[in-house]
Image (tube, rainbow, N blue to C red):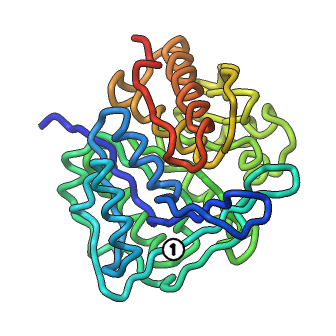
Amino acid sequence: MDQQGVISLGEAFVDFISLDRSNTKFQQLLGGASVNVAVGSRRLGIPSYYLCKLGTDEMSQFVEQEFQKERVNTSFSVRTSSKKICGVYVHINEGGDRYFHSYVNPTPDEVLTEEELRREVFDGAKIFYFGSGTLFQKNAKQTTEAALKYAKDAGNIIAFDANLRLKRWENEEHCRQTVSSFLKYPHIVKLAEDELYFLTGTHSIDAGIAQLSGWKIPFLFITMGSEGACAVMDGEQIFVPAPAVNAIDTTGAGDAFMAALLYCFHEKGVPTNHSLVKEYLQFANNIGAVATTEIGSLSANFDPEYFRS
């Protein structure tokens, strides 16, 4: 059977995005890193499956409606009346930059369990994507490990984006050790520059990449904001600068970058040379840049025509 589509495993969020520097007025938007990747993948034209636990209250209905609008398949998710959707407040600092201010998580133990995973979604999909956003929670970590086994058995391309949010972890060392322990699974790993430094205890791109070399990650991607991004394949670094755009809000830019990478791997296959990796990197840079031109992680429209075969 021809495998098609991207599976995203995670936690659905509602982002409350501050509209001004007073941080008293907010816009309610669908969010969460794994959600952003699921939606971004679908907007780029590939089937998208989202796996999580949803509730039945008004906030969960909002999330479900947004998924339906985006044509993301949630039929493999689970609903329970006790589940409450997580919220995250994104404030604006004095310099005008957005930052994650606080999380609201009324039901932290209500997560998708290992027993609630359905193997058939992995058998039909081509890529399995996950992040660190729920790995701090014991049951969620076990579910992720089970999902990784299903993905490996099904021959999925496995992709991981650290997407570190230290406010959600017990302490920094717990975060570092847990996230590092998952680097042995993926074919694709994406880290922001500061995440690279955090995980490796280094202070330069070269030193961080050298520190990670022992994991033998087939395709490592490092994003550097407005500077661009680099990829590492077979020990060689490939750098591509970011395009110039009128950036308004960087929320979700890294997730858009990841969605674009998954699109490339899905549509063009696993790259066999550095030239192709550079093409993938260029496309991901373009899509990531587009995501910064509107407020909110999912407000900008992605256009697959940025990618030229």
Three-letter code, disc 1:
Cys
Q: Position of residue 264 (x, y in %)?
A: 41, 27
Q: Position of residue 190 (x, y in %)?
A: 59, 41
Depth check: 269 or 154 in front? Answer: 269
The residue lying at 58 percent from left, 72 percent from top is 136
Residue 239 seen from this side: no
**Number of other residues with Cα within 10 Å of mark 1, as a class: few under 14, some 14 to 19, many 20 or more:** many
Q: Position of residue 244 (x, y in %)?
A: 69, 22
- Which residue position holds label 1? 86
Q: Position of residue 35 (x, y in %)?
A: 44, 55
The residue lying at 28 percent from left, 66 percent from top is 77
- Residue extending farthest left: 1
Q: In the visual, does 206 lie left or right of 52?
A: right
Depth check: 208 or 6 in front? Answer: 6
> Mark 1: which secondary structure?
strand
The residue lying at 87 percent from left, 50 percent from top is 95
Q: How many marks?
A: 1
Q: Quadrant of the C terminus?
A: top left
Q: In the visual, does 27 lie left or right of 301?
A: right
Q: Quadrant of the N terminus?
A: top left
Compared with 248, 145 (above or below) is: below
Please tell me in which quadrant of the rendered image residue 84 appears: bottom left
Residue 3 seen from this side: yes
Q: In the visual, does 172 lie left or right of 148?
A: right
- Residue extending farthest bottom: 82
Q: In the visual, does 61 lie left or right of 88?
A: left
Compared with 260, 189 (above or below) is: below
Compared with 300, 286 (above or below) is: above
The residue lying at 50 percent from left, 45 percent from top is 299
